[in-house]
Amino acid sequence: MQTVNTEQELIVTTVRNFVDKEVIPVASAMEHRNEYPHALVEQMKEMGLFGLSVPEEYGGVGVDTTTLARIFEEVARGWLGLSGIIGSHAVMADVVARFGTGDQKKRFLPGIASGEKRGGICLTEAAAGTDLQNIGTTATRDGAVYRVNGSKLWITNARYGNTFLLLAKTDAAAEPRHRGMSAFVFEKGAAGMTVSRDIDKLGYKGVETCELHFDNFPVPVENLIGGVEGQGFKQVMTGLEAERLNVAARGLGIARAAFEEAIKYAQQRMTFGKPIAEYQTIQNKLADMATNIEASRLLIYSAAEKRDRGERCDLEAGMAKLFATETAASVSFEAMRIMGANGYSKDFPVERYYRDAPLVVIGGGTNELQRLIIARNLLKKYASKL
């Protein structure tokens, strides 16, 4: 496993202290009010967390993928909603940094790094979530702009963000379909784009998740990622590889938080004259929870290191996302069972972890999709030579 340098270790430590001192004390109350954490966002800007995926030459931090995962684990440990504010933003930053033209990098990356240009990714539609090739949003060339028409759903940062990555069809007749898809960076301001309702969610509160509607919305031609049509699907899928890892890390953060609450409670809660941690049933639960958490961490680090070597890590990222997020779901539920009625009460944060966990199972590509990705890559890896 690679060694994290001193500077990056300092970043992780700084984030951990920020979460302990500033986030955890207010997270549950703000989450229950579904209150947007404006003050915490300003602190994250000052810490450079919006520039994690931006190279240093453009004003970013430019951390390696393992460090990025560790940071997302820490933030999600405090509050999943807060991690979402930098999650999809980091994917947008990664796509622009990897595939943007020189001009696009100069125009967008410094603002993205500072948090001045803050936003996310516009991919999902009513008929296209897991199957992104089925999107219906179009971008039609009209002189110096593309005219965008269509709607996008589940857009994180849609209301308070101002800069977004958009996937749209520029050639509806292309076969296969992905060859007719292009990616753009757009900024709010021009007429023709409406932020519609905030989606009311079970968990993942604090961060806004909205619908966007486009009606001849103009996007400058120079904002076409890479300057070439038809490359958007490949560009976005590379970004989603990074998203799977940050979602996996968020799942790890939820699981770790739930486990720490449970093991602390188990050592304090007395029944029949002794702490419940001394009962074998509880010990078995704690052992399984801790083992799955550690396995999740190692899967994430393995995929992250492969990505940092410049290799595709679809298989490893899929495994990490699948296992870590399922661990988040199971550990948060087991923590609630260990804590009994107190785990079900809003007086303790475990009920919040339990409500948040399904988001990471579904988001970043459902775990049913991850299994298909894993199987497809395994079949390719072990293809019969007969």
Image: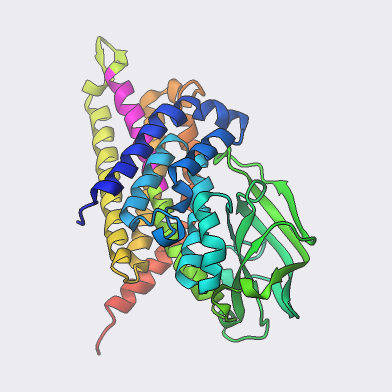
- Which residue is more in the foreground, 305 or 261? 305
Judge whether residue 330 can be spotted in this image. Answer: no
Q: Residue 291: image x %, image y %?
A: 24, 43
Residue 377: which quarter of the image?
Answer: bottom left
Point 65% across, 63% down: residue: 186
Point 67% across, 61% down: residue: 126
Instruction: Name the image colouring.
Output: rainbow
Point 59% across, 36% down: residue: 38
- In the figure, 201 relative to 162: above or below? above
- Which residue is more in the foreground, 283 or 46? 46
Furthest residue toward top? 273
Judge whether residue 240 can be spotted in this image. Answer: yes
| Magenta range | 250-267
Of the 4 image quadrants, the one containing the N terminus is bottom left
* Type of secondary structure dominating the magenta stretch: helix
Q: Residue 302: image x %, image y %?
A: 26, 59
- Which residue is more in the foreground, 35 or 10? 10
Q: Residue 44: image x %, image y %?
A: 48, 41
Q: Is residue 32 left or right of residue 69?
A: right
- Which residue is more in the foreground, 256 or 224? 224
